[in-house]
């Protein structure tokens, strides 16, 4: 007998899981007390078959009520991921997840010269037809948030970022501002698309999806797990997290804000979140306040801006949305972020910023509750009660 591969094993387990789910549904309808009553009657009447059947029911009822936490770890685009999910069979989907992430990387990475995105960036102004199923959904969401943020989220900003890296700009030296020809290529309005094709309206326009790709990748991993009947999960990819369901009656999946964000305020400060069925993205200013994912500039004035916003923790329904909005907030600063939260009711945020005296302070939008003591902050969704 040959060795069954992990892929085939998962396939067989999926089929078995569907069958067991039907049995489980019927067993749930049958109270345990009724099973025990029938078992006693069988013992008294010496019906061994009946006894064995009902013993089997009890074993199944106990076994089917238990789930195992599967933990997976890996790396994509030099970014670590950590995944946990509840599964009755302990099935391992590492190979499928890695294959999915590889497909996403080869389709949408601007760092790979042969990716579909890189080929589009080198393409002229004629129609470019999609090959991967990922390109258009990411572009469509990018265009939506580009419009909702008045250009603060702008995936065409990479030429301006690249120019700044080569020739740093001093705000007091107007002669060193970027050339008009470079700036004129920075607008998502110069690209149009439908579900089949995409087209540039101006030569030199380039796309860079890194400010939304992490979030989109997490969403696609969740979609993959759901096709296998998994609903309770936590997926962490870099600064983006998705939590679905609760792993136990005692509480939700733990979400701790990484130390690189809390260190902006206090190295000993701990920030935790208690959320169910939510997506979270964290963006921050690093070092000399380099923008999140290096592609956040949305307008010419932002090129020279020094926003007081230090970090944004954005909460919403899906990761691609919160990832993009976190980027936009870091591009335009505190006031813009607060105004955006009033306009976009589908997101909430916890903001860390410097006040007028240069002292770190916090802002919590109406969608979140904050509990704070000397060394810790706990954030909880205002619309959900988490045990």
Image (spheres, helix red, strand yellow):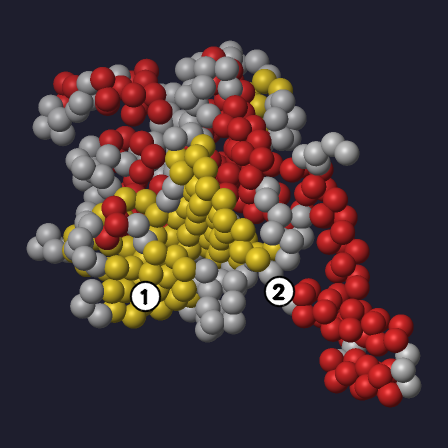
Q: Quadrant of the N terminus?
A: top right
146 relative position to 351: left or right: right
Name the foreground residue: 52 vs 74: 52
Does dot 2 land on a helix, a strand or a loop?
loop
Mark 1 touches mark 2? (CB < 8 Å): no
- The residue under the point 18% across, 22% down is 168
> Can residue 192 be seen in this snapshot?
no
Task: Write down the residue under mark 2.
Answer: 66
Which of the 4 quarters of the picture holds residue 28?
bottom right
Within 10 Å of disc 1 (Cα), the crowding (few <14, some 14-19, many 20+) is some
Give the image location of residue 60, x and y in percent.
73, 67
Task: Write down the residue under mark 1.
Answer: 378
Give the image location of residue 199, x and y in percent.
55, 21
Q: Using the image, determine if residue 289 lies above or below residue 37.
A: above
- The residue under the point 36% across, 27% down is 157
306 relative position to 172: left or right: right
């Amino acid at each position: 007998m040959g060795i069954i591969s992990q892929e085939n094993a998962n396939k067989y387990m999926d089929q078995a899981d569907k069958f067991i789910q039907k049995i489980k549904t019927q067993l749930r309808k049958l109270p345990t007390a009724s099973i025990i009553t029938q078992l006693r009657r069988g013992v008294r009447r010496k019906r061994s078959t009946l006894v064995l059947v009902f013993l089997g029911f009890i074993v199944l009822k106990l076994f089917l009520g238990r789930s195992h936490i599967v933990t997976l770890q890996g790396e994509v685009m030099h970014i670590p991921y950590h995944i946990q999910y509840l599964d009755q069979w302990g099935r391992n989907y590492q190979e499928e997840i890695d294959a999915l992430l590889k497909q996403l990387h080869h389709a949408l990475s601007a760092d790979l010269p042969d990716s579909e995105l890189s080929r589009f960036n080198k393409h002229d102004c004629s129609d470019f037809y999609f090959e991967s199923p990922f390109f258009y959904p990411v572009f469509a969401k990018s265009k939506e948030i580009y419009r909702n943020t008045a250009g603060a989220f702008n995936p065409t900003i990479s030429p301006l970022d690249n120019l700044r890296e080569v020739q740093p700009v001093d705000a007091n030296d107007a002669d060193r501002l970027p050339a008009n020809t470079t700036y004129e290529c920075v607008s998502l309005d110069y690209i149009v698309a439908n579900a089949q094709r995409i087209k540039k309206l101006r030569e030199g326009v380039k796309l860079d999806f890194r400010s939304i790709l992490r979030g989109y990748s997490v969403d696609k991993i969740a979609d993959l797990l759901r096709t296998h009947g998994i609903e309770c999960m936590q997926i962490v990819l870099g600064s983006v997290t998705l939590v679905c369901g609760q792993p136990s009656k005692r509480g939700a999946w733990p979400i701790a804000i990484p130390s690189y964000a809390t260190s902006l305020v206090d190295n000993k400060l701990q920030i935790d979140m208690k959320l169910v069925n939510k997506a979270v993205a964290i963006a921050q200013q690093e070092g000399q306040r380099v923008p999140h994912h290096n592609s956040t500039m949305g307008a010419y004035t932002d090129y020279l801006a020094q926003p007081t916003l230090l970090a944004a923790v954005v909460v919403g329904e899906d990761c691609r949305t919160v990832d993009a909005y976190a980027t936009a907030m870091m591009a335009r600063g505190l006031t813009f972020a607060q105004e955006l939260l009033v306009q976009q009711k589908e997101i909430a945020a916890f903001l860390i910023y410097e006040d007028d005296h240069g002292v770190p302070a916090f802002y919590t939008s109406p969608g979140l509750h904050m509990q704070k003591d000397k060394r810790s902050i706990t954030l909880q969704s205002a619309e959900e009660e988490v045990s």
